[in-house]
Image (tube, rainbow, N blue to C red):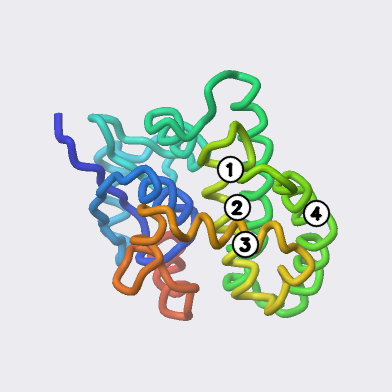
Amino acid sequence: MSNKVVLTYFDGRGRMESIRWLLATAGVEFEEVFLTTKAEYTKLLEDGALLFQQLPLVEINGMKLIQTKAILNYIAEKYNLHGKDPEERVQINMYAWSLVDLMEMIMVLPFQPDAESKLANIQTKAKERYLPVFEKALCGPVHLVGGKVTMADVLLMECSLMLEEKFTGILGDFPNIKSFQGRMGRHPGIKKFLEPGGKRKPQPDDCYCQTVKTVLYS
Protein backbone atom coordinates (compact mmCIF):
# COMPACT_ATOMS: atom_id res chain seq x y z
CA MET A 1 0.00 0.00 0.00
CA SER A 2 1.39 3.38 -1.02
CA ASN A 3 1.75 6.01 1.70
CA LYS A 4 1.43 8.80 -0.85
CA VAL A 5 -1.64 10.98 -0.85
CA VAL A 6 -2.56 11.88 -4.42
CA LEU A 7 -5.21 14.43 -5.40
CA THR A 8 -6.67 14.30 -8.90
CA TYR A 9 -8.56 17.38 -10.03
CA PHE A 10 -7.97 20.58 -11.99
CA ASP A 11 -5.20 23.09 -11.36
CA GLY A 12 -7.51 25.38 -9.45
CA ARG A 13 -9.66 25.64 -6.36
CA GLY A 14 -13.08 24.13 -6.97
CA ARG A 15 -14.23 21.31 -4.73
CA MET A 16 -10.66 20.19 -4.04
CA GLU A 17 -9.55 23.36 -2.28
CA SER A 18 -11.11 22.61 1.11
CA ILE A 19 -9.45 19.18 0.98
CA ARG A 20 -6.08 20.85 0.36
CA TRP A 21 -6.70 23.18 3.29
CA LEU A 22 -7.52 20.31 5.65
CA LEU A 23 -4.55 18.18 4.60
CA ALA A 24 -2.24 21.19 5.00
CA THR A 25 -3.58 21.86 8.48
CA ALA A 26 -2.98 18.22 9.39
CA GLY A 27 0.58 18.48 8.09
CA VAL A 28 -0.01 15.84 5.42
CA GLU A 29 2.10 16.14 2.27
CA PHE A 30 0.28 15.40 -0.97
CA GLU A 31 0.91 15.16 -4.68
CA GLU A 32 -1.45 16.48 -7.33
CA VAL A 33 -2.50 15.25 -10.76
CA PHE A 34 -4.09 17.99 -12.84
CA LEU A 35 -6.57 17.02 -15.54
CA THR A 36 -6.26 19.03 -18.75
CA THR A 37 -7.91 16.85 -21.42
CA LYS A 38 -11.11 14.92 -21.92
CA ALA A 39 -9.05 11.80 -22.63
CA GLU A 40 -7.52 11.89 -19.13
CA TYR A 41 -10.95 12.08 -17.54
CA THR A 42 -12.27 9.31 -19.78
CA LYS A 43 -9.34 7.09 -18.81
CA LEU A 44 -10.23 7.50 -15.12
CA LEU A 45 -13.80 6.47 -15.91
CA GLU A 46 -12.69 3.46 -17.93
CA ASP A 47 -10.36 2.36 -15.15
CA GLY A 48 -13.17 2.51 -12.61
CA ALA A 49 -11.31 5.07 -10.51
CA LEU A 50 -14.28 7.43 -10.14
CA LEU A 51 -17.15 6.02 -8.13
CA PHE A 52 -20.35 7.64 -9.46
CA GLN A 53 -18.15 9.22 -12.19
CA GLN A 54 -17.35 12.17 -9.92
CA LEU A 55 -14.41 14.40 -9.05
CA PRO A 56 -12.48 15.27 -6.96
CA LEU A 57 -10.55 12.04 -6.44
CA VAL A 58 -8.31 11.48 -3.42
CA GLU A 59 -6.08 8.43 -3.18
CA ILE A 60 -5.13 7.77 0.44
CA ASN A 61 -4.35 4.66 2.47
CA GLY A 62 -5.03 2.40 -0.50
CA MET A 63 -8.48 3.90 -1.09
CA LYS A 64 -9.86 5.97 -3.96
CA LEU A 65 -12.26 8.44 -2.43
CA ILE A 66 -14.81 10.72 -4.05
CA GLN A 67 -17.56 12.96 -2.61
CA THR A 68 -16.02 16.06 -1.05
CA LYS A 69 -17.87 15.91 2.27
CA ALA A 70 -17.02 12.24 2.76
CA ILE A 71 -13.36 13.01 2.05
CA LEU A 72 -13.33 15.94 4.44
CA ASN A 73 -14.94 13.85 7.16
CA TYR A 74 -12.39 11.08 6.67
CA ILE A 75 -9.42 13.45 6.85
CA ALA A 76 -10.87 15.21 9.89
CA GLU A 77 -11.43 11.91 11.68
CA LYS A 78 -8.03 10.49 10.76
CA TYR A 79 -6.06 13.54 11.82
CA ASN A 80 -7.97 14.49 14.97
CA LEU A 81 -9.76 17.50 13.49
CA HIS A 82 -13.30 16.25 14.13
CA GLY A 83 -13.90 16.62 17.86
CA LYS A 84 -13.72 14.14 20.73
CA ASP A 85 -17.31 12.85 20.77
CA PRO A 86 -20.56 12.78 18.74
CA GLU A 87 -21.77 16.01 20.32
CA GLU A 88 -18.69 17.94 19.19
CA ARG A 89 -18.73 16.28 15.78
CA VAL A 90 -22.30 17.29 15.04
CA GLN A 91 -21.48 20.91 15.97
CA ILE A 92 -18.40 20.81 13.75
CA ASN A 93 -20.44 19.39 10.87
CA MET A 94 -23.16 22.04 11.24
CA TYR A 95 -20.57 24.78 11.00
CA ALA A 96 -18.55 23.05 8.28
CA TRP A 97 -21.36 22.24 5.88
CA SER A 98 -22.88 25.71 6.28
CA LEU A 99 -19.51 27.16 5.27
CA VAL A 100 -19.38 24.78 2.30
CA ASP A 101 -22.82 26.04 1.25
CA LEU A 102 -21.57 29.62 1.31
CA MET A 103 -18.32 28.84 -0.50
CA GLU A 104 -20.18 26.99 -3.22
CA MET A 105 -22.14 30.16 -4.00
CA ILE A 106 -18.80 31.81 -4.77
CA MET A 107 -17.28 28.74 -6.42
CA VAL A 108 -19.87 28.57 -9.20
CA LEU A 109 -19.73 32.28 -10.09
CA PRO A 110 -17.03 32.00 -12.80
CA PHE A 111 -19.21 29.53 -14.68
CA GLN A 112 -22.31 31.71 -14.68
CA PRO A 113 -22.94 34.31 -17.37
CA ASP A 114 -24.62 36.72 -14.94
CA ALA A 115 -22.11 36.36 -12.10
CA GLU A 116 -21.93 40.07 -11.25
CA SER A 117 -25.66 40.22 -10.61
CA LYS A 118 -25.37 37.52 -7.95
CA LEU A 119 -22.62 39.15 -5.91
CA ALA A 120 -24.88 41.46 -3.93
CA ASN A 121 -27.10 38.57 -2.88
CA ILE A 122 -24.10 36.51 -1.75
CA GLN A 123 -22.72 39.44 0.22
CA THR A 124 -26.06 40.00 1.93
CA LYS A 125 -26.39 36.35 2.87
CA ALA A 126 -22.83 36.27 4.18
CA LYS A 127 -23.31 39.35 6.36
CA GLU A 128 -26.82 38.58 7.60
CA ARG A 129 -27.04 34.78 7.76
CA TYR A 130 -23.57 33.29 8.10
CA LEU A 131 -20.99 35.66 9.57
CA PRO A 132 -23.06 36.70 12.62
CA VAL A 133 -23.24 33.05 13.70
CA PHE A 134 -19.46 32.69 13.66
CA GLU A 135 -18.87 36.11 15.21
CA LYS A 136 -21.05 35.09 18.17
CA ALA A 137 -19.43 31.64 18.45
CA LEU A 138 -15.99 33.27 18.67
CA CYS A 139 -17.00 35.75 21.38
CA GLY A 140 -14.62 34.38 23.99
CA PRO A 141 -13.61 30.96 22.68
CA VAL A 142 -10.42 30.76 20.64
CA HIS A 143 -11.85 28.02 18.42
CA LEU A 144 -15.36 27.15 17.28
CA VAL A 145 -15.71 23.76 18.98
CA GLY A 146 -13.89 21.98 21.79
CA GLY A 147 -11.16 24.53 22.39
CA LYS A 148 -8.89 23.23 19.64
CA VAL A 149 -8.48 23.43 15.86
CA THR A 150 -11.09 21.40 14.00
CA MET A 151 -12.39 21.11 10.46
CA ALA A 152 -14.87 23.89 11.23
CA ASP A 153 -12.06 26.33 12.03
CA VAL A 154 -10.18 25.40 8.87
CA LEU A 155 -13.21 25.94 6.65
CA LEU A 156 -14.05 29.24 8.36
CA MET A 157 -10.52 30.43 7.65
CA GLU A 158 -10.83 29.39 4.01
CA CYS A 159 -14.29 30.92 3.61
CA SER A 160 -13.47 34.21 5.33
CA LEU A 161 -10.47 34.75 3.05
CA MET A 162 -12.62 33.97 0.00
CA LEU A 163 -15.17 36.52 1.12
CA GLU A 164 -12.50 39.18 1.57
CA GLU A 165 -11.29 38.52 -1.97
CA LYS A 166 -14.76 39.27 -3.31
CA PHE A 167 -15.97 41.91 -0.87
CA THR A 168 -13.39 44.35 0.45
CA GLY A 169 -13.95 45.19 4.10
CA ILE A 170 -16.69 42.60 4.62
CA LEU A 171 -15.23 41.62 8.00
CA GLY A 172 -15.24 45.19 9.28
CA ASP A 173 -18.25 44.47 11.50
CA PHE A 174 -16.93 41.08 12.60
CA PRO A 175 -13.83 41.71 14.74
CA ASN A 176 -13.89 38.27 16.36
CA ILE A 177 -13.61 36.58 12.98
CA LYS A 178 -10.82 38.95 11.98
CA SER A 179 -8.90 38.11 15.15
CA PHE A 180 -9.56 34.43 14.50
CA GLN A 181 -7.97 34.82 11.06
CA GLY A 182 -4.82 36.16 12.67
CA ARG A 183 -4.60 33.21 15.06
CA MET A 184 -5.26 30.62 12.38
CA GLY A 185 -2.72 32.24 10.09
CA ARG A 186 -0.03 31.40 12.62
CA HIS A 187 -0.83 27.68 12.56
CA PRO A 188 2.28 26.04 11.04
CA GLY A 189 0.43 24.03 8.40
CA ILE A 190 -1.79 26.91 7.36
CA LYS A 191 1.08 29.39 7.35
CA LYS A 192 3.02 27.15 4.98
CA PHE A 193 -0.08 26.64 2.80
CA LEU A 194 -0.67 30.38 2.44
CA GLU A 195 2.87 31.58 1.93
CA PRO A 196 4.19 32.35 -1.60
CA GLY A 197 4.90 29.07 -3.34
CA GLY A 198 2.44 27.24 -1.10
CA LYS A 199 -0.27 24.93 -2.36
CA ARG A 200 -3.23 27.28 -2.05
CA LYS A 201 -4.70 27.90 -5.48
CA PRO A 202 -5.41 31.39 -6.84
CA GLN A 203 -8.85 32.65 -7.71
CA PRO A 204 -10.21 30.94 -10.83
CA ASP A 205 -9.43 32.63 -14.13
CA ASP A 206 -10.69 32.11 -17.68
CA CYS A 207 -8.06 29.45 -18.37
CA TYR A 208 -9.17 27.38 -15.39
CA CYS A 209 -12.84 27.66 -16.33
CA GLN A 210 -12.16 26.67 -19.93
CA THR A 211 -10.13 23.64 -18.81
CA VAL A 212 -12.99 22.45 -16.59
CA LYS A 213 -15.47 22.83 -19.44
CA THR A 214 -13.19 21.04 -21.87
CA VAL A 215 -12.53 18.07 -19.59
CA LEU A 216 -16.07 17.56 -18.32
CA TYR A 217 -18.37 18.84 -21.02
CA SER A 218 -16.65 18.71 -24.42
The part of the image, by quadrant, that contains residue 88 is top right
Distance CA(mark 4)–CA(mark 2): 12 Å
State the residue position of label 1: 152
Distance CA(mark 4)–CA(mark 3): 12 Å
Q: Secondary structure at mark 3?
A: helix
Tag 2 near tag 1, CB within 8 Å: yes
Q: Residue at x 60, y 43 (%)?
A: 143
Identified by mark 2, the residue type is Leu
**Marker disc for residue 160:** 3
Is the residue 80 above or below the residue 66 in the image?
above
Distance CA(mark 2)–CA(mark 3): 6 Å
Tag 4 near tag 2, CB within 8 Å: no
State the residue position of label 2: 156
Tag 2 near tag 3, CB within 8 Å: yes
Relative depth, front residue between 84 and 21: 84
Q: Where residue 197 appears, x then y in whole percent?
A: 29, 71
Identified by mark 3, the residue type is Ser
Identified by mark 4, the residue type is Pro
Distance CA(mark 2)–CA(mark 1): 6 Å
State the residue position of label 4: 132
Distance CA(mark 1)–CA(mark 3): 12 Å
Crowd rating for badge 4 (residues with CA inside 10 Å; few <14, some 14–19, many 20+): some
Crowd rating for badge 3 (residues with CA inside 10 Å; few <14, some 14–19, many 20+): many
The part of the image, by quadrant, that contains residue 87 is top right
Answer with left or right where residue 171 lies relative to residue 149. right
Which sits earlier in the primary sequence, circle 4 or circle 3? 4
Which sits earlier in the primary sequence, circle 1 or circle 4? 4
Is the residue 69 above or below the residue 63 in the image?
below
Q: Secondary structure at mark 2?
A: helix
